[in-house]
């Protein structure tokens, strides 16, 4: 049997990823008391599509070429496709959110412990079917506000400084003694 070498690639496996939506509208996706509906049991392919910040031209007469800065961040969209199941609790939340236009919290938890959370407005849902298959559903979400990312790494606390070594008392001995003569 050939010896396996460790991989140098960094990655996160998808199996075991948890995807959830808040059952009620909220304005803070990190609230501790949010009740979540599990999207992981029907969604096969979630996709976060980060948006683009506006470019603001700041060129002046003293500029040597056009100059720009960026405006507010647009955090983009989030789409989810998977198995359509009309009576699934999470899909019911998504359809309700589409109808009422209110934001819901979304969170993703990956097997490496990293997490992401944001508020989103469900803008569209679709389903499709083909012979010899299953009914597929897609939900599109417009992200509103900021997106939080947590690496899942334990918080690092600075190591306490080592205690200074005690200073030994002076050694008295014959070799150090000075004698006075009179």
Image (spheres, helix red, strand yellow):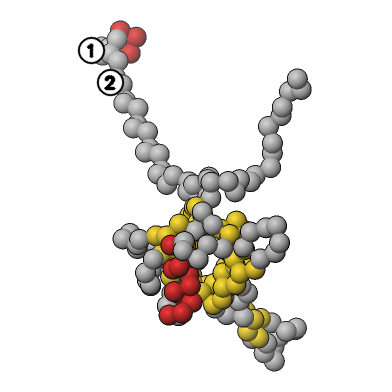
Residue beneath the point at 54% across and 77% down: 123
Check residue 169 in the rendering and tell me which mark sits there, or answer none. Answer: 2
Q: Residues within 10 Å of mark 2 (few under 14, many from 20)?
A: few
Q: Residues within 10 Å of mark 1 (few under 14, many from 20)?
A: few
One can see residue 75 in this view:
no
Q: What quarter of the picture does the N terminus occupy?
A: top right
Disc 1 on helix, strand or loop? loop
Residue 90 in the image, given as x and y percentages of width and height:
46, 63
Q: Residue furthest left?
A: 182
Residue 128 in the image, given as x and y percentages of width and height:
65, 68
One can see residue 127 in this view:
yes
- State whether residue 27 is above or below residue 56: above
Q: Which of these two is toward me, 51 or 109?
A: 109
| Left-right relation of 17 to 27 | right
Give the Cα separation between the discs numbered 2 and 1.
Answer: 31 Å
Residue beneath the point at 59% across and 66% down: 137
Residue 12 in the image, given as x and y percentages of width and height:
60, 46
Disc 2 on helix, strand or loop? loop
Q: Which of these two is toward me, 128 or 155?
A: 128
| Left-right relation of 60 to 34 | right
Residue beneath the point at 28% across and 13% down: 172
Q: What quarter of the picture does the C terminus occupy?
A: top left
Residue hosting label 1:
182
């Amino acid at each position: 049997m050939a010896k396996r070498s460790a991989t140098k690639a960094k990655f996160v496996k998808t199996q075991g990823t948890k995807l959830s939506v808040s059952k009620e509208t909220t304005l803070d996706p990190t609230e501790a008391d949010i009740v979540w509906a599990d999207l992981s049991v029907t969604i096969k392919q979630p996709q976060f599509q980060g948006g683009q910040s506006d470019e603001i031209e700041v060129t002046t007469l003293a500029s040597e070429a056009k100059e720009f800065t960026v405006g507010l961040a647009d955090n983009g969209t989030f789409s989810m496709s998977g198995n359509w199941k009309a009576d699934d609790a999470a899909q019911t939340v998504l359809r309700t959110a589409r109808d009422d236009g209110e934001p819901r919290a979304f969170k993703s938890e990956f097997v490496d412990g990293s997490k992401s959370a944001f508020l989103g407005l469900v803008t569209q849902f679709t389903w499709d079917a083909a012979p010899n298959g299953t009914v597929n559903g897609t939900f599109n979400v417009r992200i509103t506000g900021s997106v939080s990312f947590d690496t899942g790494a334990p918080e690092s606390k600075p190591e306490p400084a080592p205690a200074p070594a005690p200073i030994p008392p002076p050694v008295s001995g014959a070799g150090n003694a000075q004698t006075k003569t009179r």
